[in-house]
Amino acid sequence: QVEELRPLLEQADRGRNGKISKRDLMRVLKKEEARRCLHKLELDIQVILALFQLLDAEGRGKVLIDEVLYGMLHIKGSPADLHLAMVLFQSKRTLGRVDNLYKILEEATNVDPEDFEQNKQPASRPRSRLTTGPLNMGREIST
């Protein structure tokens, strides 16, 4: 049933990049054919708009059509299913932000962020033992 919406969403994809804006999504959802699909899925337009907000983790105003359809599949049903879907989307948002931080760290320091995952000292920074200052408390730090 969700797949019945795919052609409508793809027609609204002006950039032909597999993404849809909130405004274009609203236009699609107001069409009679889309409303019938939502009725079959027992979904409300307001729920779909909330889904869009969850999917638009970075606030760019566009989300992948596949994600919208996948999200629609997972938000129908019990409140527990909806809660689980929200947690999954929030996790996606968090992972996206962590990935961005990794990229920034890598570009700024020329250090592979995976070195930190393995508790290795990055080769580009020598270690020193500084024991002065109230916040150090004798811990080894990089300089």
Image (tube, rainbow, N blue to C red):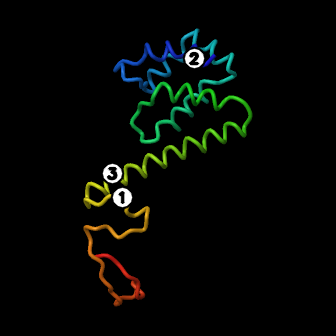
Structural crowding at the residue carrying mark 3, measured as other residues with C-alpha within 10 Å and reported as few (<14), some (14–19) or many (≥20) = few
Given residues 41 and 31, the one toward you in this image is 41
Of the 4 image quadrants, the one containing the C terminus is: bottom left
Q: Residue at left 54%, top 18%? A: 29
Numbered disc 1: secondary structure: loop
Q: Is residue 67 above or below residue 119?
A: above
Which numbered mark, 1 or 2, is in the foreground of this view? 1
Q: Amino acid at mark 1?
A: Pro
Residue 74, by quadrant, is top right
**Residue 87: image x %, image y %?**
60, 45
**Residue 99: image x %, image y %?**
40, 49
Q: Residue at left 25%, top 58%? A: 108
**Residue 68: image x %, image y %?**
53, 27
Numbered disc 3: secondary structure: helix
Given residues 115 and 25, the one toward you in this image is 115
Structural crowding at the residue carrying mark 1, measured as other residues with C-alpha within 10 Å and reported as few (<14), some (14–19) or many (≥20) = some
N-term mark: 1 or 3: 3
Residue 14, by quadrant, is top left
Which numbered mark, 1 or 3, is in the foreground of this view? 1
Quick check: 90 left or right of 64? right
Structural crowding at the residue carrying mark 2, measured as other residues with C-alpha within 10 Å and reported as few (<14), some (14–19) or many (≥20) = few
- The answer for how far apart the CA atoms under marks 1 and 2 are is 39 Å
N-term mark: 2 or 3: 2
- Residue furthest out toward the top: 32
For disc 2, the marked residue is 3
Quick check: 24 left or right of 132? right
Q: Are the residues flagged by discs 2 and 3 in contact, CB closer than 8 Å? A: no
For disc 1, the marked residue is 113
For disc 3, the marked residue is 103
**Residue 92: image x %, image y %?**
51, 43
Given residues 138 and 37, the one toward you in this image is 138
Quick check: 1 left or right of 108? right
